[in-house]
Structure formats: structure tokens, C-alpha cells
Amino acid sequence: MHRAGELRKNQTPAEAKLWSRLRAHRLAGVGFRRQHAIGNYITDFCAPSKMLVIELDGSQHLEQEEYDAERTAFLKSKGYRVLRFYNNDVMKNIEKVLEVILENL
């Protein structure tokens, strides 16, 4: 199975929670995809029509800041805007996360 499919099957609790609010055009009628490949990277969520990528970061991202910076630079070079949220923010304050996403659509 390809990597994006594996990631879709093994969502983190934060990814599942956010996906439940983004799927099926639930947020402002915008279509989001999860585990969407762009170049060699697989984004957590992407709204292709809005050129917006949403990444959820767990504690492991503290050790991979350089990789995340390269990834963000690549996505920006392709014209995407990148929003990053900590898993904790999604789990504890989903309404604020959705508000920020809406402001960027």
C-alpha cells in the first residue's frame, strides 16, 4: 500500500478530530483532502482549490524542525500557504483552530 493510504488508516486522534470538521466540504464549503501528496511530501490536510495546507505537529516535530522548515519552504515554492497547529491545540481548542483556518481560506 502506498504511504498516503497507510497514513489515512493510522490517523492520530488530533487528525481524526480535525478531519471530522473538514471532511465533506463541512468548513465553508471548501473541499479538503487528507494525506495529500505534493511533490515528495504528504501533507496532513490540503485544500487544493485554496492552495492551503494544514499540518498538525506532535511532540516529535520539536526534533525535526529543519525537515519541517524544508518541507514548508517547498510547499510555499509551489504556491501553497501552510498553517501549523499542535495536536494539543486541536484536541483542547478545536474552535480556535477552525477560526484560524477560516481566516486563511
Image (cartoon, grey):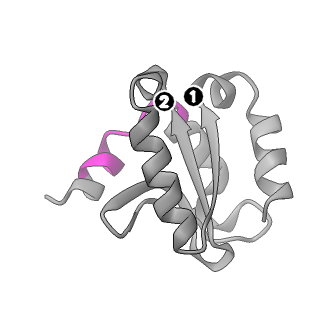
Quarter residue 104 falls in: bottom right
Q: Give the residue type that dot 2 points to.
A: Pro
Which of pointers 1 and 2 lies earlier in the amino acid sequence? 2
Question: Relative to residue 29, is residue 63 depicted above or below?
Answer: above
Q: Is residue 12 left or right of residue 102?
A: left
Q: Nearer the viewer, mark 1 or mark 2?
A: 1
Label 1 Cα neighbours within 10 Å, binned few <14 / some 14-19 / many ≥20? many
Quarter residue 95 falls in: top right
Where residue 68 sits in the image (x, y, percent)?
46, 42
Magenta stretch: dominant SS?
A: helix
- Rendered residue at 64%/25% (across/down): 91
Element type at mark 2: helix
Label 2 Cα neighbours within 10 Å, binned few <14 / some 14-19 / many ≥20? few
Element type at mark 1: helix
7 inside magenta stretch:
yes
> Which residue has dot 1 on it?
87
Question: Relative to residue 24, is residue 7 depicted above or below?
Answer: above
> Which residue has dot 2 on it?
13
Where residue 12 sits in the image (x, y, percent)?
43, 33
Kindly report the distance in space between the C-alpha atoms of the residues bearing marks 1 and 2: 8 Å
Q: Nearer the viewer, residue 50 or 77?
A: 77
Q: Give the residue type that dot 1 points to.
A: Asn
- Rendered residue at 84%/46% (across/down): 99
13 inside magenta stretch:
yes
Q: Which residues are magenta?
A: 6-14
Q: Dots 1 and 2: beta carbons under 8 Å?
A: yes
Q: Which mark is residue 23?
A: none
